[in-house]
Image (cartoon, rainbow, N blue to C red):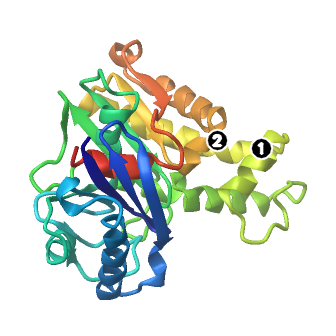
Amino acid sequence: MKYSIGIDIGGTNTEIGLVDETGQILLKTKFHTFEYLTSEKYIIKLSDEISKFFETIPLQKIEGIGIGAPMANHFTGFIEDAHNLPWHNNINIVKLLKNNFNTPIVLSNDANAAAIGEMVYGNAKDLDNFIVITLGTGVGAGIVINKKILLGASGYAGEIGHTTAIIEGRQCNCGRKGCLETYCSANGIIETAKELIEKNNDSLLHGIQNLSTIDIYNAAIKGDKVSNEVFNITGKILGYQLAQATLITSPSHIFIFGGVANAKDLILNPIRNSFYNNLLNVFKSSVKIELSGLPQGNAAILGAASLVL
């Protein structure tokens, strides 16, 4: 049996799992990413957590460590300018971890890791061309063309989350305005809800402190008009952008992945409606939009682990 360690570095939590070649997660743990505000402290914490796994499986039985992270460069081993992470310096995370662990270490953008995970463990096992869209703290995309992940010259190809959705729209943490991420990430959805609540005091969302996407979902399934409109607006914007991406990449499938995808038809239906209404006719019968086939709660770890296996 082969084993790997998968690490998902997210804007909220860092999750680590010990995975076997069948996709079973034998052990997992997590910690809050933002509790470690410098890269030095973060690497010490991460290394300590990884070391605990070797108490169960000896180092020689581990095929390697796979890491998915925002703004991660597969070619250089660096995480660069990741505005959803707490530190502001660029860090060569592969080099720093190799100082502590004598095993292969593979780094990839978190959305690329999700796409490879979909190909190894999910619904894309028999597919050659597909896109995985990750909806969470940010919006990412992993694009697979002819069974190869699209990296481009710089390693940063596929940043659909930073394509412009609304010209001169909301300010994005990346420094640009109107990025898709500012409308379709968890934070973007909450911002849309707040804007609508100001115009409608009758919403079930009115008066909720520390509003979350779960609050919006719960209100939507109870029939709250504002909450349902939030999903409609989000899906309309995302579907339009995916129609543009399809013109360039021609996927057979687009998979929606991440916490926001838990809303299922509430988000899928408006995405599909907008997508097909804005898609060039020659593509309309050849592209499907579906939920990710990776298991909820473990998907990001499996995606990272698949980078090795």
Q: Quadrant of the C terminus?
A: top left
Q: Are marks 2 and 1 in contact (CB under 8 Å)?
A: yes
In this view of the protein, which residue sits in the foreground, 92 or 228? 92
Q: Position of residue 42 (x, y in %)?
A: 35, 81
Q: Is residue 230 visible?
A: yes
Residue visible at 35% across and 18% down in the picture: 283
Residue topped by disc 1: 220
Q: Nearer the viewer, mark 2 or mark 1?
A: 2
* Kind of residue at disc 2: Ala
Residue topped by disc 2: 263
Q: Judge left or right: residue 24 versus residue 108.
A: right
Q: For residue 55, what is the image quadrant?
A: bottom left
Q: Secondary structure at mark 2?
A: helix
In this view of the protein, which residue sits in the foreground, 115 or 235? 115
Q: For residue 114, what is the image quadrant?
A: top left
The answer to whether 127 is drawn above or below residue 223 in the figure is above
The answer to whether 299 is drawn above or below residue 154 in the figure is above
Q: Quadrant of the N terminus?
A: top left
Q: Position of residue 264 (x, y in %)?
A: 62, 36
Q: Is residue 164 visible?
A: no
In this view of the protein, which residue sits in the foreground, 75 or 247? 75
State how far apart marks 2 and 1 are (Cα): 10 Å
